[in-house]
Image (cartoon, rainbow, N blue to C red):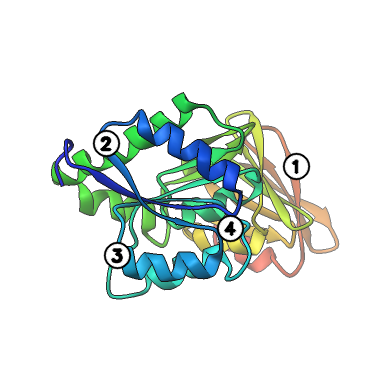
């Protein structure tokens, strides 16, 4: 599809006013055509196979089937999942959305300019794919150990390079990522993040802590066969007895 060709957009949102707004925003975008509208997860599942859109813009919480479940099934099918833009009032699902390789994540209420930016990102990706870097992008974004994480920062998502992450701390069903002198709360458990991180660079030293080995500055005895790790940002993190063997392989 060339840059000038029409993008066929499927809209899925259970709020009629939200769909009206998207229609108004879409009319100002040359080459963007809404080909289907859905108000439930069931309608979304049907339309994805029937309409085969070029782009999907959808809310997360809708009646019927779970939206993420619908998208994951579509991604595992014979056809590739079309590019997806999430538009929702809930910012806590952003990490899971980008796990599905979402193009953008709009937090309601969003402006016409923000909508236009998301469409530009879709077209930019099309250009990049035609430029021959599709394989590199897929490896980077969808590989088992990505080189970055997208984390919420207010009403936007920002990329954090894994090399900059010092450590990650569990906070109930969330995790706090410490990087570059800042911290970011993400809606993922420590176990889920651990599964995505490269075990050659990250080690779980406690049930509530993962550290980046490149940021370990000191390992000291803490009594009772336990250790304390000092990190590059000055943080001290206790190593549990159960996790100590995993850390010892990094110690000469």
Q: Identify the element where label 2 is drawn.
A: helix
Packing grade of label 2 (10 A; few <14, some 14-19, many >=20) is: few
Q: Label 3 belongs to which residue?
A: 80
Q: Looking at the image, which residue is at 66% across and 52% down?
A: 187
Task: Relative to 228, say whether 27 is above or below.
Answer: above
Q: How many marks?
A: 4
Q: Looking at the image, which residue is at 33% across and 69% down?
A: 50
Check whether the beta carbons of the residues at disc 4 and disc 1 lie within 8 A of each other.
no
Check whether the beta carbons of the residues at disc 1 and disc 3 lie within 8 A of each other.
no
Query: Considering only order in the chain, which callout, 1 or 4, is on the residue closer to the N terminus?
Result: 4
Q: CA distance from mark 3 to mark 4?
A: 25 Å
Q: CA distance from mark 2 to mark 1?
A: 43 Å
Q: CA distance from mark 3 to mark 2?
A: 18 Å
Q: Label 4 belongs to which residue?
A: 193
Q: CA distance from mark 4 to mark 1?
A: 21 Å
Query: Considering only order in the chain, which callout, 4 or 3, is on the residue closer to the N terminus?
Result: 3
Q: Residue furthest right?
A: 224
Q: Quadrant of residue 223?
A: bottom right
Q: CA distance from mark 1 to mark 3?
A: 45 Å
x, y percent for residue 216: 60, 44
Q: CA distance from mark 2 to mark 4?
A: 29 Å
Is 245 placed left or right of 239 in the picture? left
Task: Relative to 62, say whether 42 is above or below.
Answer: below
x, y percent for residue 99: 47, 56
Nearer to us in this view, 219 or 214: 214
Q: Of the residues tagged 3 and 4, which is closer to the observer?
A: 3
């Amino acid at each position: 599809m060339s840059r000038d060709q029409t993008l066929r957009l499927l809209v899925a949102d259970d709020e009629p006013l939200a769909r009206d707004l998207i229609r108004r925003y879409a009319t100002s975008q040359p080459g963007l055509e809404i080909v289907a509208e859905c108000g439930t997860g069931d309608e979304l599942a049907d339309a994805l196979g029937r309409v085969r859109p070029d782009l999907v813009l959808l809310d997360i919480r809708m009646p019927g089937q779970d939206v993420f479940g619908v998208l994951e099934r579509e991604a595992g099918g014979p056809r590739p999942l079309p590019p997806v833009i999430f538009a929702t009032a809930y910012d806590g699902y952003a990490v899971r959305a980008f796990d599905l390789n979402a193009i953008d994540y709009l937090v309601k209420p969003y402006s016409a300019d923000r909508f236009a930016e998301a469409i530009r990102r879709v077209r930019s990706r099309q250009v990049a794919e035609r430029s021959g870097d599709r394989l590199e992008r897929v490896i980077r974004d969808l590989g088992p150990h990505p080189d970055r994480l997208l984390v919420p920062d207010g009403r936007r998502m920002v990329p954090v390079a894994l090399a900059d992450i010092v450590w990650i701390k569990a906070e109930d069903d969330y995790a706090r990522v410490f990087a570059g002198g800042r911290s970011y709360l993400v809606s993922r458990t420590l176990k889920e993040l651990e599964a995505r991180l490269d075990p050659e660079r990250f080690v779980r030293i406690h049930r509530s802590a993962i550290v980046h080995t490149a940021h370990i500055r000191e390992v000291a005895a803490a009594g009772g066969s336990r250790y304390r790790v000092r990190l590059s940002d000055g943080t001290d993190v206790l190593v549990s007895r159960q996790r100590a063997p995993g850390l010892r392989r990094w110690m000469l």
